[in-house]
Image (cartoon, rainbow, N blue to C red):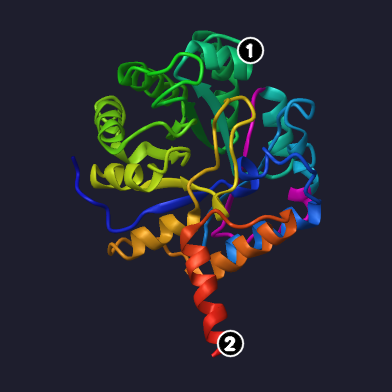
Amino acid sequence: MTGIPQRVRIVEAGPRDGLQNESAMVPVETKVALIEKLAAAGLRDIEAGSFVSARRVPQMADTKRVLAHLRPPPHVHLSALIPNMRGLEEALACGMRGVAIFAAASESFSKENIGCSITESLTRYAPVVEAAVGAGLAVRGYISCALGCPYEGEVAPRAVATLARDLAALGCSEISLGDTIGVGAPLQARRLVEKVGRDIPMAQIAVHFHDSYGQALANIFACVEMGVGIVDASVAGLGGCPFAPGASGNVATEDVVYMLEHSGIETGVDLAALIDAGSFICESLGRETQSRVARASLLQREKRRRA
């Protein structure tokens, strides 16, 4: 255990992981505006989209068009998810500074999600990561089902740690541990980070929690107490996984920022501006925010307006 970090870096997954599960197509201009609002709120790491099969994830088919409209300031790092060399080539053509690959800690989910075994996925990714690193891109490795699989149930922490080590050996500078179906609890999350931290540096570990059972914030704080300084979240709690039955939305970025800032941990994010960004995308989607912090804050704003 390295102690609670003074600052936590938020990786905003809303424009990718948040919107990929939407049934209705979100217009390019709406995605662009959302990313611009998130950057204006102080988020410096934003997943802008993905270069995956348009047939399997149609909501991400316009990523190239979205990126063409964006002119982020130098301090804002945009990234995209890629499945293969073709995805990398598209990311490079769009001037991306970072990409992410995705593997799974369970064989069943790996085969369902990317159509191959875990070992085969690593073999496929090896040349992709090598080429990305050679081109000067930062590469992040996602591990799905780190705390449970919709097909196999419980996943052994040792299996996650081994995969994390293998992804780091390929050249991934950051490994995000994903509770894809949101079944984990704080002590489980703590033990997982402890196990993974024996194989790769704590500074390389990120956590990505879905909130299916309402445990995401508690899980995040348990991991932050272990020294984790990178947390994934999605504005307004948007998201889910199209290939994981039962996966609900990600933990809301607004709730994560509130929890960390009120615990004395810096995020560099303007909460009021972030709530506005969440309100914008929720209004565009015709739904209510899943962020408790946003709902409470918006209610207080309305009370003050009427006073």
Residue 147 part of the magenta segment: no
Please tell me which residue is depicted at 73% across the width and 43% down the height of the picture.
94
Depth check, mark 2 against mark 1: the one in front is: 2
Instruction: From the viewer's side, name the closer residue of 36 and 183.
Output: 183
Mark pair 2, 1: CA separation? 55 Å
Residue 241's quadrant in the figure? top right
Please tell me which residue is depicted at 56% across the width and 38% down the height of the picture.
137
The residue identified by callout 2 is 306
Residue 260's quadrant in the figure? bottom left
Q: Which label number is shown at residue 274?
A: none
Mark 1 packing: few (<14 Cα in 10 Å), some, or many (20+)? few
Q: Which mark sits nearer the N-terminus, 2 or 1? A: 1
Q: Which label number is shown at residue 115?
A: 1
Hey, what amino acid is under mark 2? Answer: Arg
Give left or right: position of 74 versus 50. left
Give left or right: position of 275 versus 106. right
Mark 2 packing: few (<14 Cα in 10 Å), some, or many (20+)? few
| Count of numbered circles on the image | 2
Q: Which residues are magenta?
A: 66-84
For mark 2, give the secondary structure.
helix
